[in-house]
Amino acid sequence: MTHSPGFLALVNDAKKHVRETNIEGYRKMVDGKEKHILVDVREESEWAAGHAAGAVHLSKGIIERDIETKVPDKNATLVLYCGGGFRSALAGEALQKMGYTHVISLDGGWRAYKESGLPVEK
């Protein structure tokens, strides 16, 4: 997908402030049984087509509105993913501004997750 320059500038700025991990780093978290909440920030149609097993769905459009109800613990480790790691960085930056202290964006997003062989569900 080709993204507009303005969107890419916004994402690149967010990525300066949000911790990222790649799929190998995420797999280490899973293998090490590190407690975390996996959050899918994609749109409803993307979620319905398939998502990471055990993930919570809070699309980027509503995550700021609903996160405190779904995850009241602002010290919880949240791993956010989208299609490729752009929207998750933007959402992660917003959550940090709301006081969430352990936010991680999955670089490579859903595409990397699917290719990794980790469990998926519909």
Image (cartoon, rainbow, N blue to C red):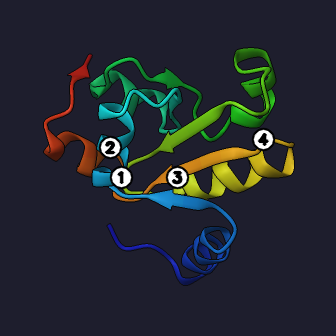
Q: Which mark is residue 63?
A: none
Mark 2 in CB contact with mark 1 (< 8 angstroms): yes
Q: Amino acid at mark 4?
A: Tyr
User: Which label was assigned to residue 100?
Assistant: 4
Q: Tell me the CA gap for discs 2 and 4.
A: 22 Å
Residue drawn at x 73%, y 27% is 67
* Residue 120 higher or lower than 112, as above or below: above
Q: Nearer the viewer, mark 3 or mark 1?
A: 1
Residue in the foreground of this view, choosing between 24 and 8: 24
Q: Which residue is mark 3?
A: 105
Label 1 Cα crowd, 10 Å radius (few <14 / some 14-19 / many 20+):
few
Give the mark nearer the N terminus: 4 vs 3: 4
Q: Quadrant of the C terminus?
A: top left
For badge 3, the amino acid type reads: Ser
Mark 4 element type: loop
Q: Quadrant of residue 87?
A: bottom right
* Residue at the image point whose x is 36% and y is 57% from the top: 22
Q: Residues within 10 Å of mark 4 (few under 14, many from 20)?
A: many
Where in the figure is residue 19, as x and y percent of width and height?
59, 60
Task: Find the distance from the CA under tag 4 to the CA under tag 3.
Answer: 13 Å
**Could you tell me which secondary element the residue under label 2 belongs to?**
helix
Q: Which residue is mark 1?
A: 25
Dot 2 amino acid type? Lys
x, y percent for residue 56: 51, 21
Which mark is first along the chain, 1 or 3?
A: 1
Q: Quadrant of residue 60?
A: top right
Sooner in the amino-acid sequence: mark 3 or mark 2 = 2
Question: Which is more N-terminal, label 1 or label 4?
Answer: 1
